[in-house]
Image: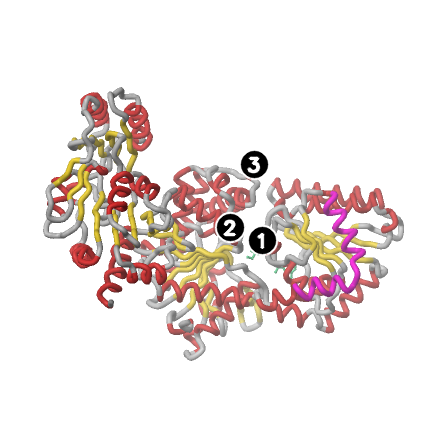
Amino acid sequence: MKTFNSSFNRLLIVSYRLPFTIQQTDEGPEILQNSGGLVSAVLSMAEQMGQNQEKSATKIHWVGHGDSSLQQLDPSALENDTFVAHPVFMDEAVHKGFYEGFSNDLIWPLFHYFPSYASFKEHDFDCYRQANIRFLEELTALIEPGDLVWIHDFQLMLLPDLLRQAMPDTSIGYFFHIPFPNYEIIKLLPRTWRQALIEGVLGADVVGFHTTDYVQHFMQSVSEVLELPIIGQRVVLPDRSIHVNAFPISIDFNKFNTIGQDSEVFATQQYYMNLLRHNKIIFSVDRLDYTKGIISRLQGYERFLIQNPDWHDKVTFVMTVVPSRDKISQYQELKREIEETIGRINGLFGTIGWRPIVYSYRSLTFTELLALYTACDIALITPIRDGMNLVCKEFVASRHDLKGVLILSELAGAAQELRDAIIINPTDTQEVADAIKQALLMPLAEQESRLLHMRKHLQNHNVFRWSHNFLTAFNDMITNSTDLETDLPIQPFITAFGDARKRLLLVDFDGTLAPIVNDPAEARPSEALKTILINLAENSDVVVISGRNRLFLEKTFTDISVYLVAEHGAFLKKPDQPWERLDLSTDDWVDPVRLTMNQFVDRFPGSFVEGKETAIAWHYRIAEGEDVEGQAIDLAAQLRRVSSSIPLTVIQGNKVVEVKPAKHSKGTVAQTIAEQKPYDFIISIGDDTTDEDMFRQLPNWAYTMKVGSGVSFARYRLARQQDVETLLLRMNDVLIEA
Ligand code: GDG
């Protein structure tokens, strides 16, 4: 594995928020670094990247939104030993539409599966784009060759592609901190927005999510929205590919483990326990948000109190809600509902000496937070949806005493890792009530064993591992960027090919041997590929199997000793022999089909009809007009109704609708050829729908390969047309070595 510092010069982090607060001191303003997980992770990355470098080179540049007060500051005030802050300023109105509007009122609710809270405003999307462009302007002034730019979160989904367009050689990473929802949710976005957001993210070289579910959802959207091929963890573009994977974020385990034992934390913890008369403590802390499941948590606790009167006066729920966005009516309403519910529960069950819920609406100091993590008997973390949730990980890490129980919602990303928590569904009030009771009664030995498992996991999967894995994915991408994009097990395949005695290669032409071009007459295989085919044909039977007519194929493959199959199997030409016509059907169907197709030529300028000897095709690759794709489907439907004395096949291919007699297909001819000799190695490669007949009709041990995306009968996949050449080259090399 390459080391980080061999690949990158400086690290530039871009996130909506700068992780600093500015404090006025006697010496003037000073930046104070926040101590969040991202900052710790980034600091460790900087250390890894800059082991042998001058200190100034290892400083991390952090680009984030700055409010206008920062504009007055001297730039030197925005730098400390580790960081240089680069505030991005923008017009207040743009910021409002970008942050409060598109980010918080659309993406946040939608991506957390609250579509009814989402507000779709064109103006906000416009502001979102403008704000992303403002970030771009700041970045382009900053970037130097060799820098690694790591962009964070849902506020900056357009930025990776904007940066790729502006500075194509930049190394760009992107990490998404909230859930990526399934395609049914993404589909709610207007087409142009969803396309822009997904294309935006794909500007990066490496894209990270918290869980494999989010990765799958993203990949599904990539394939539905942009129809791009996906091979394993890569999205394949014509000129590069993007590595997409799960990198579950975590915490600085040692920090929480150590501070959990700090004397000030201990004193505060004892103070709380005394105040609460050594009752059992249930603790929760969340930002005020509808995704956090605060109301259903309260309902679960209420149900527990109703069903377990013997626990009254013996348990206290310490619920802290951290103020957030409470100027917005939806959040004000949520706050009111939370406070009413708490008031009702306390009124119903409380006594002069016992408050069932101790509620505060404020932020805790770090010491208070740690004191509550270590004082509580139960951490009750029940979001309705959460990208990861770090609070539950921090609770586990701070429990060096191996006491306490974590109750965790299955809808938090963290539930995929912390399997030894009591996992609940937060909307199931009874399940929450039962989990509270189970936790209160849990024997110490079981608490200890569950915590030990979870702590061991977090010790290994800490925030440093997260950033390390992300950077490693980067290095691997760069090292392997010219690799073949395929899911084929290459080594066994090459060995099988080299060892075979009788080999058959069946290869489609357009989109397989030759790239797709606007004018079909211009399609050509590269000279390098022709040479490979000439070499391969010396030791194997190579068949070019196409829908093209005889003349075109013969002209394209003059002097190459390959078999040619024209018009989807209607004609066969063996090396050095004349053409054989395999299809002898009547042609009473041609005229009505041509007539219908000509009507479409009139409607869509640029499209044309190609008449072959046994087939007829309408090509619309460069056709102009509305919804050509939809109209092509209509044409195919009309053509299926044409009456004829023989059965016909209507093929909807890559920008072409074609009609031919049903009797012959690439499948029938491939099967006939495959049965003529005792082949012990067969490979067939194709990209189009007609190649599916071939994949279906060849023996199931044959290596069938689909080029590009889409459903297929093929066993394997090659991502791009260029991969065909790379694969054939490797096959050729093994024969030369032998
Ligand atoms: C996004 C995703 C994902 C909370 N209250 C207080 C306080 N905190 C600290 C906690 C923790 C952090 O804030 C909250 O962690 P989350 O995991 O909820 O993270 P967010 O940044 O809100 O949200 C989330 C995360 O990104 C990371 O990718 O896990 O799913 O929504 O560190 O300790 N800290 C103090 N007082 C408080 O009252 N001092």
The answer to whether the residues at label 1 and label 3 have Cβ atoms under 8 Å apart is: no
Marks 2 and 1, how far apart at CA:
9 Å
Q: Are marks 3 and 2 in contact (CB under 8 Å)?
A: no
Report whether 133 appears left or right of 32.
Answer: left
| Marks 2,1: beta carbons within 8 A | yes
Camera-side residue of 658 and 327? 658
Disc on the earlier residue, 3 or 2: 3
Does residue 161 appear to the left or right of 69 in the view shown? Answer: left
- Residue 67 in sight from this viewpoint: no
Classify the position of the C terminus by image quarter. bottom left
Helix, strand or loop status at disc 3: helix
- Magenta residues (range): 430-453
The residue to which callout 2 is attached is 214
Disc 2 residue crowd, few under 14, some 14–19, many 20+, Cα 10 Å: many
Task: Report ligand 1 position as a quadrant.
Answer: bottom right
Task: Residue 144 in the image: state x and y as whole percent.
Answer: 34, 67
Q: Which residue is mark 3?
A: 116
Q: In the picture provided, is 327 more to the left or to the right than 443? A: left
Give the residue number, with chain letter if any, for mark 1: 413
Q: Is residue 49 above or below residue 729?
A: below
Q: Quick one: label 3, few (<14), some, or many (20+) residues within 10 Å? A: few
| Residue type marked 1 | Gly
- Looking at the image, which residue is at 52% across and 50% down? 213
Predominant SS of the magenta segment: helix
Q: Which mark is residue 575?
A: none
